[in-house]
Amino acid sequence: MFYQLSWQTLPGTKGLSCSGFRAVPTKSPDTKRGVAFECTSEAECADLMLKLEAHFGAQRFSNNAAAFEGVKAYVLEWSAKR
């Protein structure tokens, strides 16, 4: 099943942070303007959301584009390792 990923990018004193990751099932993933991925189960998807929260919780980004590219790269790498 394909999922479309979304998250919040919030300002902080040391840069932008990413949190509140959520995935919505989709039949038409948008990989040009968003981050989409495939999971074999809801449990695998939930596990990825936990990994994203843990990985990006302490990271800070200088702008929205850097945050987006960082999350996208992480998900693509995760997908390639599956």
Image (cartoon, rainbow, N blue to C red):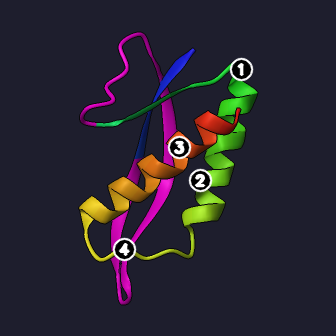
> What is the C-alpha distance between the residues marked 1 and 4?
31 Å
Q: Which badge, 2 or 1, comes first in the chain's sequence? A: 1
Res 69 quadrant in image: bottom left
Location of residue 26 with respect to 30 vertically, above or below? above
Which is more foreground, mark 1 or mark 4? 4
| Labelled disc at residue 41 | 1
The amino acid beneath tag 3 is: Val
Q: Are marks 2 and 3 in contact (CB under 8 Å)?
A: yes
Quadrant in which the C terminus appears: top right
- The secondary element bearing badge 2 is classed as helix
Name the residue tied to disc 4.
Answer: 61
Res 38 quadrant in image: top right
> What is the C-alpha distance between the residues marked 2 and 1?
17 Å
> What is the C-alpha distance between the residues marked 2 and 3?
9 Å
Quadrant in which the N terminus appears: top right
| Labelled disc at residue 81 | none
Residue 53 at what x, y percent from top left? Answer: 60, 58
Q: Are marks 1 and 3 in contact (CB under 8 Å)?
A: no
Region rendered in magenta: 7-33
| Labelled disc at residue 75 | 3
